[in-house]
């Protein structure tokens, strides 16, 4: 078993979004990670999930130590993630796996996507360590050079893991209600307060927000601070772990409640822009959530497909039975579309980091759209895949319960779905993000030239125009009605984005001898979008190719859209 080899979409999508040299460099890593994730890592993840971390608050002599002790399986997974593959290091220094520069975000997310198909919990500390290094590098790189080096180390003896302690009892989604207080001592600051939900609670370096005296109320009054687990003199910092959370999922990773008792801290960047700086960390963490959800979907769908091929009911494998094929098809499509969306976001983030302001503006809205939609889809897909397995799917001997538990995290952490939808609305109000999306992606669709996708291109151009107009109508509504409508509108934007991305991938495959499978996927996704009641006969007939890869007749790919295209033509004036 190799998770990369069993994914019919991953390599073709990377062919399109990566430069030739980067695509060549990642290939052996895909093979290596795919094999490790499906083998050793999968077994370690199973053991770590059943042996969660334990909090030891006091030593045998009564000294307060607040240590979190992990099962050896978790420690081994850390070695694989941080050391062997350098997943937290590759965005911050050249040379990881032979890259002459820092590794592209697309590469990092592709490898992480394979990793998460085995282990979800550790991906949270990975993401926060990566994003903590990013924030320090962007806003105070020279001052915190040694901390950045530790966060991006691949040697266990030098590695420091990172965390983001934001949530308080009254300051969750409403960060402006943060009550932690900061006191200036000249050479350093101290923080006093309580953080209610702190993941990777035993992190070596923590970024957090605290109220700066005289700076005002709300988010304007918050500064960003770096809190080390150990003070410069080697003593334990005033970070008390009160208890660990008993969570539904991510059981291998420690989340807890923390009290800051005059904790030593250093300010990061401009204290007057603390919340804006933390938003950078939150945004990349949200993209990581979407990536992880896409990975859970792929694993769940593969488990369902494999089960239905071996489970014989009434004389035939389940996979060959019509209703089961109709059940599996949307799961396959959602998993593939989610991966495409995540890689699109990563590619635009690479452009933004290279100085492209247009890409930066796109990333600002693409990230919440991806988190809003993909994380919701993961809950549905993992649940449906569990049901496909029947009673065994509900039993902890199988991976399905863990996938389902973990899938619920994506829609909650770093902002619940409603908070994320309101973030999309904020982008629309401030930056006309819906117009930017319509302009950019409609233009990309219009640039597609292969004759086999002409009908789909016309339909998507029309849909982008309609979404542009619908966004303007939404903004004309009273503000409370804008909030009521934004969830549905954000979902429509995201699904249209995914259909657009799939069509671009289809053209790339057609142009490079990859056959018509991608076109069948794109046409079927567009068919679901525009006419949900239509029967996807062509896709159902070619379900093996959609599940595994392989050739699809050109006529089947064309037939998937023909009925919808005819209906759309009849609707045009």
Image (tube, rainbow, N blue to C red):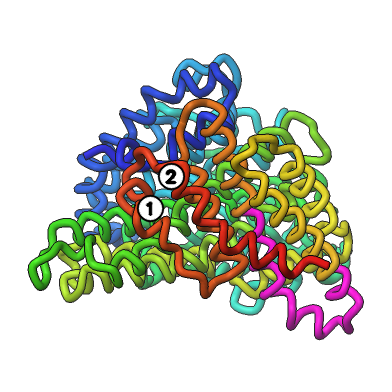
Does the magenta-highlighted stretch encompass residue 283? Answer: no
Residue 265 picture location, percent across and down:
65, 49
Locate residue 451 relative to residue 379 in the image: left or right: right
Q: Position of residue 402 (x, y in %)?
A: 30, 64
Query: Mostly what secondary structure, the magenta segment?
Result: helix
Task: Pick the quarter of the image with the C terminus.
Answer: bottom right
Residue plotted at (54% across, 46% down): 340
Residue designated by label 1:
298
SS for callout 1 = helix
Local packing at callout 1 (Cα closer than 10 Å; few below 14, some 14-19, many 20+) is many
Q: Earlier in the sequence, mark 2 or mark 1?
A: 2
Residue farthest along the right direction in this orientation: 476
Which mark is on residue 308?
none
Query: Horizontally, is 512 left or right of 429 in the view?
Result: left
Q: Nearer the viewer, residue 441 or 411?
A: 441
Do labels 2 and 1 touch, CB within 8 Å?
yes
Specify the segment rendered in magenta.
Answer: 472-498
Which residue is painted at 45% across and 25% down in the image? Answer: 26
Residue behind mark 2? 113
Q: Residue at x 54, y 39 (%)?
A: 233
């Amino acid at each position: 078993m190799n998770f990369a080899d069993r994914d019919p979409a991953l390599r073709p999508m990377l062919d399109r979004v990566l430069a030739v040299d980067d695509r060549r460099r990642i290939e052996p890593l895909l093979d290596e990670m795919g094999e490790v994730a499906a083998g050793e890592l999968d077994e370690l993840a199973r053991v770590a999930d059943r042996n969660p971390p334990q909090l030891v608050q006091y030593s045998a002599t009564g000294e307060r130590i607040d240590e979190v002790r992990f099962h050896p399986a978790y420690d081994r997974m850390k070695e694989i993630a941080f050391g062997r593959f350098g997943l937290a290091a590759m965005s911050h220094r050249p040379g990881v796996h032979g890259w002459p520069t820092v590794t592209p975000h697309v590469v990092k997310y592709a490898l992480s996507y394979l990793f998460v198909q085995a282990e979800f919990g550790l991906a949270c500390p990975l993401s926060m360590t990566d994003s903590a290094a990013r924030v320090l590098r962007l806003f105070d790189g020279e001052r915190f050079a040694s901390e950045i080096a530790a966060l991006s180390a691949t040697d266990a003896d030098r590695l420091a893991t990172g965390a983001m302690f934001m949530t308080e009892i009254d300051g969750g989604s409403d960060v402006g209600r943060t009550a932690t207080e900061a006191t200036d001592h000249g050479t350093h600051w101290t923080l006093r307060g309580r953080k209610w939900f702190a993941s990777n609670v035993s992190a070596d370096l923590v970024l957090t927000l605290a109220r700066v005296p005289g700076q005002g109320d709300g988010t304007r009054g918050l500064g960003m601070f770096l809190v080390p687990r150990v003070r410069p003199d080697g003593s334990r910092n005033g970070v008390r772990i009160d208890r660990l959370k008993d969570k539904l999922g991510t059981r291998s990773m420690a989340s807890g409640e923390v009290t800051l008792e005059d904790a030593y801290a250093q300010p990061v960047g401009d204290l007057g822009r603390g919340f804006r700086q933390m938003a950078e960390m939150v945004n990349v963490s949200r993209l990581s959530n979407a990536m992880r959800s896409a990975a859970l979907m792929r694993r769940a769908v593969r488990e369902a497909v494999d089960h239905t091929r071996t489970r014989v009911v009434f004389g035939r494998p389940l996979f060959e039975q019509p209703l089961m094929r109709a059940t599996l098809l949307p799961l396959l499509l959602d998993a593939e579309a989610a991966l495409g969306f995540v890689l699109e976001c990563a590619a635009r983030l690479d452009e933004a980091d290279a100085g492209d302001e247009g890409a930066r503006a796109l990333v600002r809205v693409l990230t919440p759209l991806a988190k809003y939609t993909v994380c919701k889809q993961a809950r549905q897909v993992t649940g449906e895949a569990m049901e496909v397995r029947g009673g065994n799917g509900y039993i902890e001997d199988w991976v399905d319960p863990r996938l389902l538990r973990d899938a619920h995290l994506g829609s909650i952490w770093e902002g619940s779905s409603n908070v994320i939808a309101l973030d999309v609305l904020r982008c629309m109000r401030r930056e006309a993000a819906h117009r930017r999306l319509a302009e950019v992606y409609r233009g990309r669709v219009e640039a597609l030239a292969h004759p086999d996708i002409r009908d789909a291109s016309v339909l998507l151009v029309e849909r982008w125009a309609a979404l542009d107009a619908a966004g303007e109508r939404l903004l004309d509504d009273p503000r409370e009605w804008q909030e009521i409508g934004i969830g549905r509108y954000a979902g429509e934007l995201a699904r249209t984005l995914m259909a657009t991305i799939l069509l671009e991938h289809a053209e790339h495959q057609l142009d490079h001898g990859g056959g018509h499978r991608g076109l069948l996927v794109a046409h079927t996704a567009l068919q679901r979008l525009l006419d949900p009641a239509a029967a996807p006969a062509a896709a159902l007939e070619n379900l093996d190719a959609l599940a595994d890869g392989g050739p699809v007749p050109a006529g089947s790919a064309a037939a998937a859209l023909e009925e919808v295209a005819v209906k759309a033509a009849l609707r045009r004036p």
